[in-house]
Image: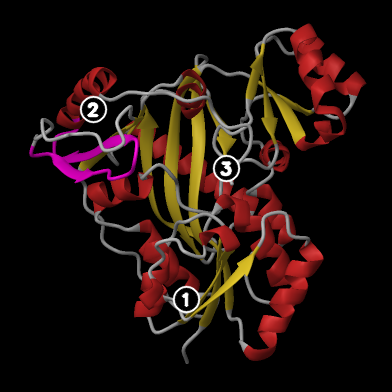
Amino acid sequence: MSLTLLCIATYHKGEEFLRECDRQGCRVLLLTEEKLRDADWPREAIDAFYYIRRGMQEDDIRRGAAYLARAERLDRIVALDDFDVGMAAMLREYLHVPGMGETTGRAFRDKLAMRSRARAAGIPCPDFVHAVNDAAVAAWTARVPAPWVLKPRAQAAAIGIRKTASPEQLRKILDTLGDTRADYVLEQFVPGDVFHVDSLVFDRRVVFAIASAYASPPMTVAHEGGIFVTRTLASADPEAKALQAASARVLDAFGLLRGASHTEFIRGRDGVLYFLETSARVGGAYIVDVVEAATGVNLWREWARIEIAGEHGSYATPSAGTLSAGIVLSLARQEEPEMRAYDDPEIVRRIRKPHHAGLIVASTDERRVRELLESYVARFYQDFHASAPPPERALD
């Protein structure tokens, strides 16, 4: 029996997920924002479109989904972006559709819930406090040495994050937030090397995982206008093994039933591997393409197969290659950067996006990948690099 999937994407992404669902014979419904009505969706793979507006009330969304459910049997509801996880969880519970509910979903979207869940499970993470209570914040800042990082609980990536070095500076920031202070978590800034693990989970079990290292922390890239670089680690690397084990522990403690996850850690100067954040979606910034270049595994495609299998089906983990791969990606001064001078045979993809310059490389030689990425960073600064201040909130 073919399934009907309601896919939610209020940002333009997940094309390969939608195509794979269609290839598997599913009926594919896409719920997206009105402003994306004319976006370049894979329309041949989508049976029907439905639209919402930014800021639409939950009651209105529930009523609209209930009206849709009169005619459509919704077997799965899938959030394709971080910002859609909460909506999908809410609709699953409301319409009694199998999958992750609101309590579990909150742990994958709310940075305060993440910290609390990790601490309860004994998983090392930066010290933190909810930014809402004056006395609690004062006691925490007296105990935890600066600098500190103030993070919006429900944003993604480095959006809205502010670093502060003194109680006076922090007080000014908190005063400007007013009644929205409860939407923030304050945590200790931990310097170190930042890593990520990209995983697939089926029936609460990690069935695929690959560890990677950022050249610079994503927050540094976003706030200081740097160039984004990440590269995969060899599966035999002790750091990769430690990261995969730590990620599996996080996903088990957080209760991810099935799907894809992008989880980040930092190796502190004290040698401890600290949990930073996790998600119930694939990584952004073309990380999916880097993983595919290294292993041949497309995370969007496999996530679709896992969702289709659901609670009662079966899923066969794909065989994975063992190449090393990485990406260098930068904002560019030019609308269409000229990159013909970059002609190394290891280049497997060129990023085609206005005002961006990007290359993905892959090789059997991990050192060669590292050398190429380092050389491209130096050349990109000269040839293309531009910077822009990080957004305070998700862009419309």
- Along the polypeptide, which appears first: circle 2 or circle 3? 2
Label 2 or label 3, whichever lies nearer to me, is 3
State the residue in front, 1 or 183.
Answer: 183
Q: What residue occupies the far right of the structure in this picture?
A: 135
Of 114 and 301, the residue lying toward us: 301
Above or below for 335 versus 207: above
Residue 313: x and y in percent read 47, 79
For label 2, the residue is 373
Three-letter residue code for mark 3: Leu
Instruction: Kindly identify the residue that appears in the image at 48 percent across and 46 percent down.
Output: 262
**Counting residues from the N terminus, which is met first, the one under dot 1 or under dot 2?**
1
Q: Which residue type carries mark 1?
A: Ile
Residue on which the image places disc 1: 308
Percent across and percent down for residue 168 are 79, 7
Residue carrying label 3: 395
In the displayed structure image, the side of residue 92 where residue 225 appears, left or right: left
Dot 3 falls on a residue whose secondary structure is: loop
Upstream in sequence: badge 3 or badge 1: 1
The span picked out in magenta is 345-366
Q: In whole angstroms, how far apart are the C-alphas of marks 1 and 2? A: 37 Å
Residue 233 visible somewhere in the drawing = no
Compared across the picture, whether 11 is left or right of 183 comes to left
- Circle 1: element type: helix
Q: Specify the quadrant of the image occupied by residue 233.
A: top left
| Closer to the eye: label 1 or 2 | 2
Label 2's element? helix
